[in-house]
Amino acid sequence: MLRRTFIPLLVFLLGIALGFCLRSARQAPAEKATYLRHSLATNGELTCPLLEIESPSGGDLALEAVRDEVQSYIKRRLAANDAAEIAFYLMDLNQGRWVGINEGKNFAASLLKIPLLIAILNKAQVFPEKLTKKIKYETQAETTPQNITPSKTLQLGESYTIEELLRFMIIYSDNTAKSLILENVDQGYLARVYSDLGLSVPDFKNPDYLISLKDFVTYFRVLYSVTYLNKTMSEKALRLLTETEFKDGIAAGLPPEITVAHKFGERGYPNGTKELHDCGIVYLSKSPYLLGVMTKGRDFDILKDIVKDIYRIVYRYRSEKGLRMY
């Protein structure tokens, strides 16, 4: 009698234990996917110090819904021959969840300015006097032609501090300022920034450096999370990026009251191919997100519209459709 009672009881207990193990195994991936947001310091105006750990892509219904609509939009524009290639990347900065479309595709455009900014500010953390060093613009710099002309450029014969050159380079995207900084920076030190962030080191004299959208947004992630520069310099870099003059991409797809720290890159080729990219952090209240769009086509105006439309789609999902991204 005792044996008859004991065996069913043992089977029952083993079943409970097995069920618990299976449940734990099913839950393990979700737990590993959690984006650890341990605060390391008080948040700044434009930064949120944390331990930078990226969750796997997908897994969030709101993000996947946005991606699906962007995917449909991209298919329509490609079918209409409005663009040859379009890449998209979206990250919820509160959770680390992200989605992308062609985010691993390489593009070539003027995107050297942000790592150059980071390298200069990294050096200035130890030697702050570097920012006040003056450089005279004595010889006409050899620069990559700009199709989107900056409203302000350096004047030949004038002297500028490194900090002033950074403003010209970031706010107005002036290639002359970039060239002048490159001539006066230790390129080995600059190369270390790429290596530290796990990115391939470019030939700094070659304007056709290839980089994927997913790699490029790394610069924004480390600035926002204060995981490379210190808080003061991360805030300084992002503040400059909020003043970016270019308003035909991201800014055109967002309400004017929304703060956005972004950088665009563009390039035209002799065969008529053009590239236009715009990437940045959108500081939506309680739900900041990182969004990047890279495009290749034949018409800058059409490419600007594509960037603007994609930013508008993402913003509409958050503000009008009520799909929370946090």
Image (cartoon, grey):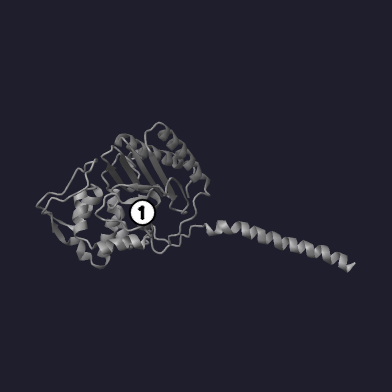
Residue at x 39%, y 40% (from the top left corner): 85
Report the number of numbered marks: 1
What x and y, as percent, mark residue 95? 47, 54
Residue at x 37%, y 44% (from the top left corner): 293
Residue at x 40%, y 31% (from the top left corner): 80
In the drawing, does residue 60 fall left or right of residue 131?
A: right
Tell me the quarter of the image containing the N terminus: bottom right
Sort mark 1 into few (<14), some (14-19) or many (20+) by Cα contacts within 10 Å: many
Tell me the SS state at disc 1: helix
Does residue 6 lie above or below 91 as drawn?
below
Farthest residue, direction right: 1
Does residue 65 lie above or below 112 as drawn?
above
Give the amino acid type for the residue marked by disc 1 in the picture: Phe
Residue at which label 1 appears: 220
| Residue 186 appearing in the image | yes
Farthest residue, direction top: 80
Farthest residue, direction front: 271
Residue at x 36%, y 38% (from the top left corner): 308
Q: In the depicted view, which residue is nearer to us: 134 or 298?
A: 298
What x and y, as percent, mark residue 204? 26, 56
In the drawing, does residue 11 fall left or right of residue 264?
A: right
In the drawing, does residue 197 fall left or right of residue 2?
A: left
Q: In the depicted view, which residue is nearer to us: 91 or 293?
A: 293
Farthest residue, direction left: 157
What x and y, as percent, mark residue 30? 56, 56
Q: Quadrant of residue 88?
A: top left
Does residue 216 lie above or below 76 as drawn?
below
| Residue 322 appearing in the image | no
What x and y, as percent, mark residue 153? 17, 47
